[in-house]
Amino acid sequence: MDGVRKLTQAYSQAPWRKQMQVLGLFLLVLVLLALVAGIYLNVTARAATIGREILGMQSRIEDLDLENANLQTRLAMVKSATEMEKRARALGFEPLDQTEITYMVVQGYIPRQQAIIAPPPEPVIVVAASLPADYTESLFDWLQERIIPSLSRVLEVQQ
Amino acid sequence: MSSEHVWRYTLLGTILSVLALFIVWQTIRIQLDPEQVQRFIEEGKTYEGEWHTYYPPRGLIYDRWGHLLAGNTTVYEIGAELGQVKNPHTIALTMNVVLGLDYSKVYDAVTQEPSKKAVYAVLDDNVTQDKIDRLIAIRDEIETTYGGSRDKDAPNLSGLVYHPHLQRTYPENSLASNMLGFVGRDENGDIRGYFGVEAKYNDLLAGQPQRAWVPSDPNRVAEIPEIPAGASLVLTIDRDIQSAMEEIVDETMESSGSESVTIVVMDPRSGDVLAMATTPRLDLNKYWRYGEIFEGETPFNRAVSQAYEPGSVYKVLTMAAGLDSKAVKPESTFVDTGLFEIGGTFIRNWNSGAWGPQDMQGCLQHSLNVCLAWVASQTGAKKFYEYMNAFSIGHQTGIELAGESSGRLKEPGDADWYDADLGTNAFGQGVSATPLQMAAAISAIANDGKMMAPRIVRSIISDGRQFDTEARMVGMPISADTAHTLTEILARSLESEASNALVEGFRVAGKTGTAEIPTPYGYTSDVTNASFVGWGPVPENRFLVYIWLEKPKTSIWGSEVAAPIFPKVVEKLVVLMDIPPDDVRNALFSQ
């Protein structure tokens, strides 16, 4: 009995060691939790920041679209027929009379082309419908194409 | 630890425990009460985000050279978030000063009690950027002066918000307004096009709006849907020709005292409408003045919507039918006795005179009603109306403009057609057509007998690609030989009578027209419709011009008021279309 007690005493851990182990385990869990929480917070914060940036960019795209439309129309206003005529007259130009025009042949002259605002539609390429051979060949065709040549090669090698 | 301390700690512990229990109990209660749950979910949703409707920018409209005729600009809707309004007086006063809105109306709108149905009040729309800049300046000034004030009555613009959106804008103001139409709101508040191409192509120009959920939570940010802009249009009209024609129209209105003046310029070879000028016109950026400018039943575009009895210009079609059917030849002689009986009705000439023996050129040159009634009778009613149908008289031309009238052509078999109508129709009486219909029909004579469908849309730009429309031939009502013969007859007739319509340096063909205006009691009115149709330079025929003066005051005769307009038009056209005079062209061709 005394021997058992001595043995137990020899292999049992000191109480302070047990407390330290429990405390260590607790701290480990705590650190892991803190780590996970930290990573989660970091990722979430970054996602939120990027989300805010995307929202901001979307709003900026809308603003730029509006500004583009504005500028395009303002440019057209500045170049309108009445404005251009006013500016031309202010610069001392007068409307041309047909009798004042001198016509001459200019080699390579390209007359004014009509408005091309966007590229023309892409040509439609008609691809002839063709079924793969798998759907059309018979079993005999398949044997003739794949198996018979292989067999004949094997036979040739054996000879 | 003393007993006093124990008591204190026990009390604190109890209170904290009760509070904790209360919180737990409340949490459970909320979770279990369906009404509360629903209320909180709904409340939460209001902060989650909002449904937003994305309107694609309306497609643009260009002239044939790419000049922008209809674009978009940013304007603002101004409103009040009712729950955030702190000083309605400041808002109402600012709106009154900056936008000229009625103080009391704004005050009433912003003092509404916010409710589920009313959280926002629209105060004004289509406010321009400069006004918004003024509002921002006022807001900043108030913020600087009264920003920290706790006085309830201190000036404050809280709750006043503005949202940008695009508004249709026409950089050329009233230019080509009758063809373009305008964009406004209908009775449901929806944006739509009215008149012209804006109405005809409304669905295409407007594109497809899309609704999307826009979350407030940045973690749930979603992509804005890619909404393709509305399709854009490239028209066949030439801005500079249109501008020149409108100038001539306005001058003619003033000089002739006409009720209206219309000029249509077409390329007979393709059917392209190069210009369509008429009166009245509307500054499309002030479209709300429509009712004021187009009083009563005034059509928005007389060139396509107002059919009238064209009078003697119609004789061109009668003669085309007669020549093409071989009923008459250019050298056929008709002895004009000043009277022709058909279906029990006597046809007389414009001056009630007898012009004696006349060939077909003489008949057209002197515009003899009697002769043309004879030509129609020689052609025969069946063939005559077959030809008129081939010229699409009484049918819409199919031009891409809203509100086209088909005119009226009575035919044998119709309840109101009589034999006498053949005689009167021959010189353009008892038949009605729009200026565009007349121009399109007569363009067949200027285009080797081929009649092209008039078109105003040259290309459609959709999904970043430009799709060109093809010129479409309606038919070939007459042969090329007939077309050349008739053009020659009409060119000679102008030259023979030294017409006011002649243009120095350019050979042109044409015909005047003076039509009495029918009243419910017959042709009893002393006002007329004066017209002229001309084309050139013969034989290339690069333009066809149709001129109509409604009820001119200075003279009732087309030869005196409409014909002199033609050279004015042509002088502008040849410069703008780079057409050298005949001698220069002939010299260039011979090189």
Image (cartoon, rainbow, N blue to C red):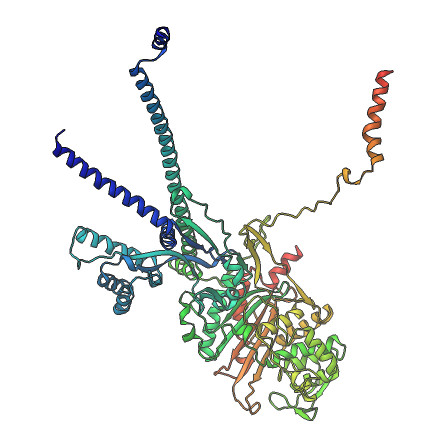
Q: Quadrant of residue B334?
A: bottom right
Q: Quadrant of residue A52?
A: top left
At 59% from the left and 67% from the top, the residue drawn is B399
| Number of marks drawn | 0
Q: Residue furthest front?
A: A1
**Could you tell me residue B210's position as x and y percent?**
48, 55
- The answer to whether B346 is drawn above or below residue B426 in the figure is below
At 48% from the left and 69% from the top, the residue drawn is B246
Q: Quadrant of the C terminus of chain B?
A: bottom right
**Could you tell me residue B462's position as x and y percent?**
55, 54
Q: Quadrant of the N terminus of chain B?
A: top left
The answer, for residue B124, to whether it is visible in the render is yes
Horizontal side of B222 relative to B501 (left or right) equals: left
B18 or A81, which is in the foreground?
B18
B76 or A21, which is in the foreground?
A21
- The answer to whether B462 is drawn above or below residue A33 in the figure is below
Q: Residue furthest top?
A: A3
The answer, for residue B497, to whether it is visible in the render is no
Q: Quadrant of residue B142?
A: bottom left
**Could you tell me residue B425's position as x and y percent?**
65, 83
B120 or B103, which is in the foreground?
B120
Q: Residue furthest bottom?
A: B344
**Could you tell me residue B405's position as x and y percent?**
57, 75
- The answer to whether B348 is drawn above or below residue B74 in the figure is below
- The answer to whether B295 is drawn above or below residue A141 in the figure is below
A11 or B345, which is in the foreground?
A11
